């Protein structure tokens, strides 16, 4: 028969290992988030950051990591959480207010019935995402202006950025992804993606260990064969088969060579002949100068 001491001896190492793994994961997310913020100068002293909180794993993780960095950062910035209640059926309205109150985070619940509009405007058989995201962005960006937010923080991570790249490549004929920092089209809001360097699998594990009260999106989540879901699965499969492939893809987004692509707006292909002549003139002058120096 096991004694209480025996039970403690068998459970303590497992608990200790689990705690160590969690600390490593949290430190990695903090480090990568801090690095992205520094690389793109996302947050300045005195900023008021509007954290868009959907109730999903990504936005919960973003909020928690930003709260953690807020404590240790020499830069002083304010955090306010905002949730857009789109009036989807069976949306648990009490979950986010309870969580944010318990965490002591200032928050707003913005109630807008975009659900009905999305359902009305989306043709039969089409996905809701385009209309839904456009309405969501419009409402959130306008509200950011109302509360005086200087930055709008979105929970997109590294995998979201690469999935967007592949979707644009496959379906829109554009070499375009999600930038870590962006000025909105109307020029009024600066959007930041602090999780830009973080992997989705790390975020999912962090959310599981933190036991966030996840709220699923029943609007688009119920639709089958979404192209983004297909691309996300492709990326996950690649990550399992070729562990370094996604790292290389994300690095490629940060290392663009316009002269090696084919966009005439970003590289002067027409003027290459002139550039060659200029290069020949520079080379000739350099040779003449070298001869003069030798003679002297």
Image: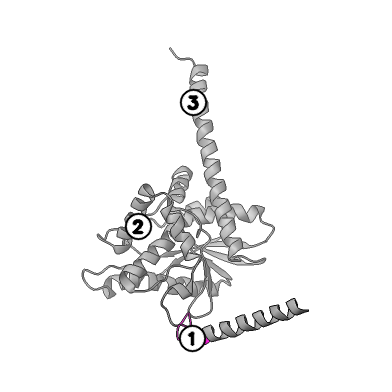
- Give the labeled residue for mark 1: 273
Q: Main secondary structure of the magenta part?
A: loop
- Give the labeled residue for mark 3: 11
Give the foreground label among 1 and 2.
1
- Looking at the image, can residue 12 be seen? yes
Image x and y of residue 53, in percent? 47, 60
In the structure shown, which secondary structural element does the residue marked by tag 3 occupy?
helix
Q: Do the residues labelled 1 and 2 touch (CB within 8 Å)?
A: no
Residue at 52% of width from left, 21% of height from top? 9
Q: Nearer the viewer, residue 137 or 38?
A: 38
Q: Is residue 268 magenta?
A: yes
Task: Establish if 184 lies above or below 15.
Answer: below
Q: Is residue 253 left or right of residue 27?
A: left
| Quadrant in the picture for residue 80 | bottom right
Quick one: which residue is furthest to the top in this view? 1
Image x and y of residue 47, in percent? 63, 67
Task: State which tag comes first along the sequence, 1 or 2.
Answer: 2
Quick one: label 1, few (<14), some, or many (20+) residues within 10 Å? few
Quick one: label 3, few (<14), some, or many (20+) residues within 10 Å? few
Q: In which quarter of the image is the C terminus?
A: bottom right
Image x and y of residue 249, in percent? 43, 60
Q: Quadrant of the N terminus?
A: top left
Image x and y of residue 94, in percent? 43, 55
Residue at 52% of width from left, 26% of height from top? 12
What is the spatial separation of the Cα atoms under label 1 and label 2, in whole angstroms? Answer: 43 Å
What is the spatial separation of the Cα atoms under label 2 and label 3, in whole angstroms? Answer: 37 Å
- Give the labeled residue for mark 2: 232
Task: State which tag comes first along the sequence, 2 or 3.
Answer: 3
Residue at 36% of width from left, 52% of height from top? 238
> Which span is picked out in magenta?
265-274
What is the spatial separation of the Cα atoms under label 3 and label 1, in whole angstroms? Answer: 73 Å
């Amino acid at each position: 028969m096991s004694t209480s001491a025996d039970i403690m001896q068998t459970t303590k190492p497992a608990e200790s290992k689990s705690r160590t793994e969690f600390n490593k994961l949290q430190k990695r997310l903090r480090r990568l988030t801090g690095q992205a913020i520094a690389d793109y100068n996302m947050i300045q002293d005195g900023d008021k950051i509007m954290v868009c909180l959907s109730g999903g794993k990504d936005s919960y993780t973003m909020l928690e990591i930003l709260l953690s960095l807020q404590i240790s950062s020499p830069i002083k910035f304010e955090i306010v959480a905002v949730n857009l209640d789109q009036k989807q059926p069976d949306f648990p309205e009490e979950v986010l207010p309870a969580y944010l109150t318990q965490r002591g985070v200032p928050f707003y619940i913005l109630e807008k019935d975009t659900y009905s509009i999305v359902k009305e405007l989306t043709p039969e058989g089409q996905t809701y995402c385009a209309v839904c995201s456009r309405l969501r962005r419009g409402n959130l960006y306008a509200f950011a202006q109302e509360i005086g937010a200087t930055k709008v923080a979105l929970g997109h991570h590294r995998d979201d950025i690469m999935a967007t790249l592949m979707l644009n490549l496959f379906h829109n004929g554009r070499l375009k992804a999600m930038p870590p920092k962006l000025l909105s089209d109307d020029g009024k809001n600066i959007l930041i993606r602090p999780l830009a360097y973080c992997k989705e699998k790390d975020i999912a594990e962090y959310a599981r260990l933190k036991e966030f009260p996840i709220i699923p999106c029943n609007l688009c989540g119920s639709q089958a064969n979404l192209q983004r879901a297909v691309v996300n699965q492709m990326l996950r499969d690649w990550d399992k088969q070729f562990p370094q492939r996604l790292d290389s893809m994300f690095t490629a987004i940060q290392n663009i060579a316009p002269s090696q692509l084919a966009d005439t707006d970003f590289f002067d292909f027409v003027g290459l002949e002139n550039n060659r002549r200029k290069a020949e003139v520079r080379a000739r002058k350099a040779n003449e100068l070298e001869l003069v120096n030798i003679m002297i």
